[in-house]
Amino acid sequence: MGHKFSYEVEQFVDTPDDDLICVICRAVLRCPVRLKCNHVFCKECILQWMKRATFRISNEYLHISSCPYEWQLCPHEGCGQQVLRKDAQAHDQSCSHWRQLCPMGCGTLLVRENQAQHNCYRELQQRYVAERRRQRAIAANLRRKMQRMQSRMAQIRRQINLMCESLEVGDLEIEEGEGTSAWTDANAARIVHPKMKITCIFVYSPSCCSKPV
Ligand SMILES: [Zn+2]
Ligand SMILES: [Zn+2]
Ligand SMILES: [Zn+2]
Ligand SMILES: [Zn+2]
């Protein structure tokens, strides 16, 4: 911004002191006026700016906490640069000392170098997907094992049935275990074939042998 009769810095033989520069037009102050916040501007500059910003000088507090021409120390450790409030955002984006905790709350301290790559949400999502894939693989593996066990059990049952059929029922001796109640409760018995000396423990099945009385 500049106005018709501004004193441009270049017009001076010696570079004018910073205190004499209007931060709005960046020229040497012309008809300087001082606000309550001690900021000095060219009269015309501040009047124009007030018209644009519709700000009230009477609202001193509001102005002090929002005055765009207030110098502020860059909040990032090690920077030490003084920045006008209105330029703070632009400086923040270029400040080499910028650091911030990840806004997603993962606890990572973000700096310029890792900010672009850091995406903890995506990492978490990837880990979740990988974990689900792993669990599904475990479940599928268990299902396969169970099917193998079931078919092995069916095979054993068939073998027992065949063995029972091949035995002569008359030659069977039923060994009494703990008593008849054990037989009734467990529906199981040890059958000893006297000739073949085969001892088998099997689950009572009516289709195979009939329950002895
Ligand atoms: Zn000015
Ligand atoms: Zn001010
Ligand atoms: Zn900075
Ligand atoms: Zn994060």
Image (tube, grey):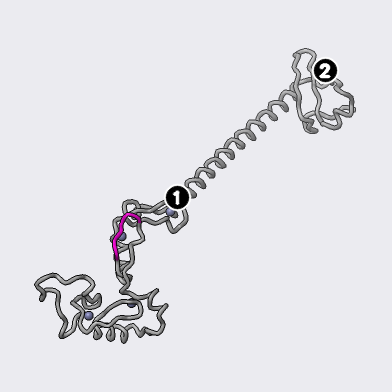
Instruction: Determine which residue is flagged by label 1.
Output: 126
Residue drawn at the location 63% of the way across and 31% of the way down: 152
Q: State whether the magenta stretch is mostly helix, strand or loop.
A: loop
Is 78 in the magenta?
A: yes
What's under tag 2, amino acid-wise?
Answer: Asp
Query: Image quadrant of residue 210?
Result: top right
What's under tag 1, amino acid-wise?
Answer: Gln
- The extreme left residue here reads 13
Q: Examine the rendered structure and indicate whether residue 1 appears above or below residue 100.
A: below
Query: Is residue 59 visible from the viewing direction of this image?
Result: yes
- The extreme top residue here reads 195
Query: Is residue 125 visible from the viewing direction of this image?
Result: no
Quadrant where the C terminus sits is: top right
Q: Examine the rendered structure and indicate whether residue 194 appears above or below residue 122.
A: above
Of 108 and 82, nearer the camera is 82
Q: Is residue 122 left or right of residue 17?
A: right
Of 64 and 212, nearer the camera is 64
Residue 14: image location, x then y, percent: 11, 70
**Nearer the N terminus, badge 1 or badge 2?**
1
Q: Secondary structure at mark 2?
A: helix
Of 189 and 42, nearer the camera is 42
Residue 20: image location, x then y, percent: 21, 75
Crowding at dot 2, Cα within 10 Å, few <14 / some 14-19 / many 20+, comes out as few
Residue 138 marker? none
Q: Which residue range is magenta in the image? A: 77-82
